[in-house]
Image (spheres, rainbow, N blue to C red):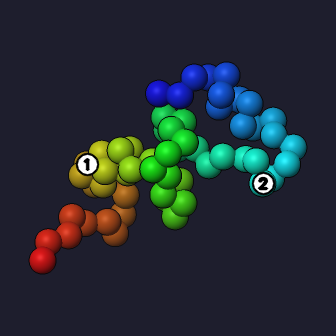
Amino acid sequence: MAKTSMIYRELRRKYPTRVRNRCKLCGRPRGYIRRFGLCRICFREMALEGKIPGVTKSSW
C-alpha cells in the first residue's frame, strides 16, 4: 500500500511528464498495467476472482 501523501502528490503534479502511473486500488507505482489501470498484484487477484471480464488464465 502506497503512502497516502504520495498518492495525493501525484494528483497535484503540474507537468505531465513527471506524473507516475499508479494502481487504482492500492497506489503501487511499479508493475502497472496501463490497459487495466492496475498493478500486477491487484490484476492477478481480480482476474482469478473473475472480476475482470474476458481475462482467463493461460496455458500452453
| Quadrant showing the C terminus | bottom left
Residue 46 in view in this figure: no
Residue 42 horizontal/vertical position (percent):
38, 44
What residue is at 48 percent from the left and 57 percent from the top? 33
Left or right of 33? Residue 20 is: right
Query: Circle 1 sits in a helix, a strand or a loop, which is it?
Result: helix
Left or right of 58? Residue 15 is: right
Left or right of 46? Residue 5 is: right
Q: Residue furthest right?
A: 14
Query: Circle 2 sits in a helix, a strand or a loop, which is it?
Result: helix
Amino acid type at image mark 2: Thr
Frontmost of labels 2 and 1 is 2
Q: Which residue lies furthest to the left in this view?
A: 60
Residue 29 horizontal/vertical position (percent):
55, 42
For marks 2 and 1, the one nearer the N-term is 2
What residue is at 45 percent from the left and 50 percent from the top? 31
Residue 32 horizontal/vertical position (percent):
50, 52
Q: How crowded is mark 1: few (under 14 residues within 10 Å), some or many (20 or more)?
A: few
Left or right of 13? Residue 29 is: left
Say above or below: 37 vs 60: above
Instruction: Check disc 1 and report the residue beneath it.
Output: 49
Q: Which residue lies furthest to the bottom in this view?
A: 60
Inter-mark Cα distance, 2 to 1: 34 Å
Say above or below: 7 vs 40: above
Amino acid type at image mark 1: Glu
Instruction: Check disc 2 and report the residue beneath it.
Output: 17
Name the quadrant containing residue 34: bottom right
Residue 53 horizontal/vertical position (percent):
36, 63
